[in-house]
C-alpha cells in the first residue's frame, strides 16, 4: 500500500498496517529511506533511489532495466489490458508548465500525459 513520504511516515505506515509490514520499496532515498528502515527486516528493505544508503542499512538496491525489451513487454501488457497505466489527464504540449505544476502539487493519482 503506498504511503506518503514526509514527517510522520513511520506513524502513517503503522496506522495503515497495524500488524506490521513485510517489506518496503523506497523510491526517494535519503532521510525518507532512513525513516522507514526500522519498520522491516533489512533483507526486505529495497531502494531504487539510494543504493549506497540501502546497502549501509543492510537492504538491497533495485536495478532498473531500461531496454527496449522491457518497453516492448510493458506495451504488450497495456495493449492486453493487463497493466493499468493510470493516465488521469491528457494535455496539449503547450500546457506543459501547468501539467508539471499539477504533478508537483502531489494531488494527481496516475500519469499526466502531454501530446504534441
Image (tube, helix red, strand yellow):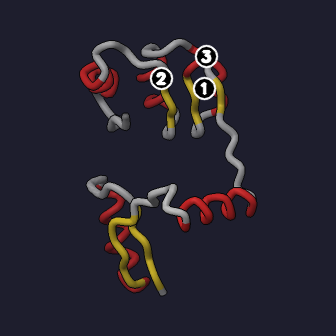
Reading the image, the residue beneath label 3 is 43
Reading the image, the residue beneath label 1 is 53
Left or right: 3 as drawn, with respect to 80:
left
Residue 56 location in percent, x, y?
A: 64, 19
Sequence-first tag of 3 and 2: 2
Q: Circle 3 sits in a helix, a strand or a loop, which is it?
A: helix
Q: Residue at x 24, y 21 (%)?
A: 15
Picture quadrant of residue 51 = top right
Q: Is residue 96 above or below residue 3?
A: below
Q: Residue at x 43, y 83 (%)?
A: 93
Q: Residue at x 68, y 46 (%)?
A: 64
Of badges 3 and 2, the one in the foreground is 3
Residue 82 location in percent, x, y?
A: 51, 56
For label 3, the crowd category at 10 Å Cα-Cα, with few meaning under 14, some 14 to 19 and many 20 or more, is: few
Q: CA distance from mark 3 to mark 2?
A: 15 Å
Q: CA distance from mark 1 to mark 2?
A: 8 Å
Q: Circle 2 sits in a helix, a strand or a loop, which is it?
A: helix
Left or right: 40 as drawn, with respect to 95:
right
Residue 26 location in percent, x, y?
A: 50, 34
Picture quadrant of residue 107 = bottom left
Of badges 1 and 3, the one in the foreground is 3
User: Do the numbered discs 1 and 2 sit on residues whose CB atoms are within 8 Å?
Assistant: yes
Which of 65 and 104 lies nearest the eye of the viewer?
65
Amino acid at each position: 500500500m503506498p504511503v506518503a513520504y514526509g514527517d510522520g511516515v513511520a506513524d502513517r505506515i503503522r496506522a495503515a498496517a497495524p500488524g506490521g509490514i513485510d517489506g518496503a520499496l523506497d523510491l526517494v532515498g535519503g532521510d525518507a529511506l532512513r525513516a522507514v528502515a526500522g519498520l522491516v527486516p533489512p533483507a526486505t528493505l529495497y531502494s531504487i533511489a539510494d543504493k549506497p544508503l540501502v546497502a549501509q542499512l543492510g537492504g538491497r538496491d533495485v536495478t532498473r532495466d531500461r531496454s527496449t525489451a522491457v518497453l516492448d513487454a510493458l506495451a504488450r501488457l497495456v495493449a492486453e489490458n493487463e497493466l493499468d497505466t493510470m493516465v488521469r489527464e491528457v494535455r496539449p504540449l503547450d500546457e506543459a508548465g501547468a501539467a508539471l505544476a499539477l504533478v508537483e502539487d502531489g494531488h494527481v493519482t496516475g500519469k499526466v500525459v502531454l501530446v504534441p
